[in-house]
Amino acid sequence: MSKRQTVVILSIAAVAIAVAFLAMSRQQDVTVAQNNPGNGSITIITISSGSLLSGATYSISPNPFTAEGSLTIQDNGKDDSDSTAGLIVLSGLQNGRFVVTQSQAPAGYDRDKLSKVIDINDDSQAVTFSNIASVAAADKTLPTSVTYTAKFECGRIPDNRGPLRPGHYDTDIGILNKQEFEVRMTWQAIVNDGRTSNLILKTLQPQTATGIVCQDLKKALVGNDEFSEGFVLISVPLDSSLLGAISGGSTVVRSGSIDILDVQVFYTANALDSLPHEVLVDKIVFTISADPSGKIPKEMLNKTLDVTVNSDLNQISDPEVRVREQIAEKYGLSEQQAVLLEIRIDGISVGVGTMIDDHALSLSRVPPQATG
């Protein structure tokens, strides 16, 4: 055998060994992936202008379930374990590095061409893809969202420092989904010259209603201010699925506006802590004969006086004690000084009074504002 033939044989053998080694390595990698317990998960988020966007399709390479080939997944498809439009959740995945690519954008939007690389190690990972309306979609007369702006006044004003007169103020924002299809909305509270809450996502089923009250606003703003005022922005993103429902439903479209929800705001001002009702009162006529403390004006001594106090049914009370309490509070007497007063009860009469009902009510409907 010649020297040249020997070199050729050795080269072929080296290539064969390398190929076999690569095949064994690949087989080992696949075996390790297949033996993985599959505790990982991926959440794919599709958004547009800060709102969830449904209808996207993605490819993941390699397939996170088998570590071979690639996987095509669609929003609310068979492998998506989350029914929320705009969110794709895959669970029970192998460990490893995966590349997520948006293969098809929602209708009317340009595809996000930037792939995302994620590493899974028995944990949960999330990737976000952002889409903007295509030029063709931007030329359409339909807006991309509908916004309702509601004013709110919440809390108590104890004095004349304002901005309103003293009293109690409450706001109740009622929201009705009057459509025959599901509507997803977000709301956000903005305090005048103050804080802004995070976006809160809510889904309204067909022909259902919800509300936002002052207690919800305080929780969203994480504040304990005695009084706050501002605005609540309620937004309905018009994604492809909702636009399809609108085009085939009963929603009114006029002059570029879309009226989807019925939003009404109910205000109460200066509301009492309890409802107005009749109360019993006692008018006690009395005379102060002597005041050892000297705190009561002398012209009030030995003079016929009277005081009116609330009276409770089926309650036993001492009129003289109640008079002493009223005098002590008015003139700053101590308990001992009040006991030393010489008081004579001259007469008692019972009457009926009514609590003052000093409050105002107001109801207004919030018109929709089309944006985009």
Image (spheres, grey):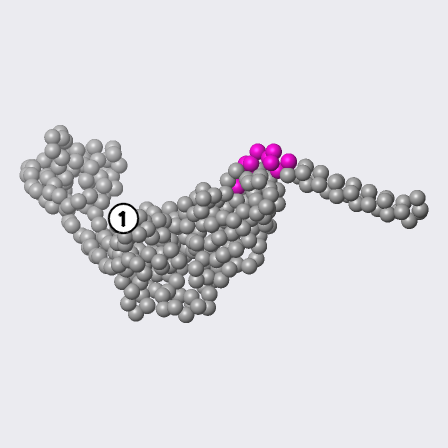
Figure quadrant of the C terminus: bottom left
- Residue 265 versus residue 72: which sits nearer the camera? 72
Expressed as whole percent of the image width and height from the top left, the position of residue 339 reads 21, 32
Q: Quadrant of the N terminus?
A: top right
* Residue 221 seen: no
Vertical relation: 239 (above or below) 21: below
Question: Which residue is found at the position 9% from the left and 35% from the top?
Answer: 345
Query: Whole-percent x and y of residue 338?
Result: 21, 35
x and y, in percent, of residue 250 in the image: 26, 59
Query: Is residue 264 or residue 6 the one in the foreground?
Result: 6
Report whether 36 appears left or right of 327. right
Asked if the magenta segment contains residue 40, the reply would be: yes
Identified at 93% across, 47% down, the residue is 3
User: Where does label 1 land, which residue?
Assistant: 208
What range is drawn magenta here? 31-41
In the picture, measured across the screen, residue 278 lies left or right of residue 175, that is left
Mark 1 residue element: strand
In the picture, residue 229 is in which quadrant?
bottom left
